[in-house]
Amino acid sequence: MYEVKDPNAIFVFKFRTHFGGGKSTGFGLIYDSVENAKKYEPKYRLIRNGLNTKVEKSRKQLKERKNRAKKIRGVKKVEYAMSL
């Protein structure tokens, strides 16, 4: 149907199955190149398609951040989280 040079430039998501099976609907985007896809697609979709790697944070880092954030109140908590 569409001529695509690189199949990695195709992104499908938001699939829903219909009751009874046999039919699913979803949404797809086809980019001209992988570079354009990397530019416009969110990181989580790039990770799903294998074009990016997920940054694994250690369990200790997550716990330390959580406990430091407990000591901060209100809007400053959001600012603190964004600074990390």
Image (cartoon, rainbow, N blue to C red):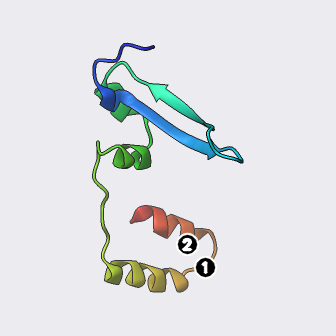
Residue 1 lies, in percent from the top left, at 45, 13
Quick one: SS at disc 1?
loop
> Which class describes the residues within 10 Å of circle 2: few (<14), some (14-19), or many (20+)?
some
Q: Are marks 1 and 2 in contact (CB under 8 Å)?
A: yes
Q: Secondary structure at mark 2?
A: helix
Q: Position of residue 34 (x, y in %)?
A: 30, 28
* Picture layout, residue 76 above or below residue 11: below
Q: Is 74 on the left or on the right of 28, as rendered?
A: right
Q: Quadrant of the C terminus?
A: bottom left
Q: Is residue 19 above or below residue 35?
A: below
Residue lying at 31% horizontally and 22% vertically, measured from the top left: 33
> Pointer 1: residues within 10 angstroms few (<14), some, or many (20+)?
few
Left or right of 79 in this view: 74: right
* Quadrant hosting residue 10: top left
Residue found 29% across the figure and 47% down from its top: 52
The answer to whether 28 appears left or right of 10 in the picture is: right
Pick the residue in front: 28 or 41: 28
| Marks 1 and 2, how far apart at CA | 6 Å
Residue 55: image quadrant is bottom left
Q: Residue at x 35, y 28 (%)?
A: 9
Residues 59 and 70: in front is 59
Per the image, the residue denoted by label 2 is 77
Q: Amino acid at mark 1?
A: Arg
Residue 35 to residue 46: above or below:
above
Q: Nearer the viewer, residue 44 or 79?
A: 44
Q: Give the amino acid at mark 2.
A: Lys
- The mark found on residue 73 in the picture is 1
User: Please, is residue 74 above or below residue 7 in the view?
Assistant: below
* Residue 72: % across, % down: 55, 80
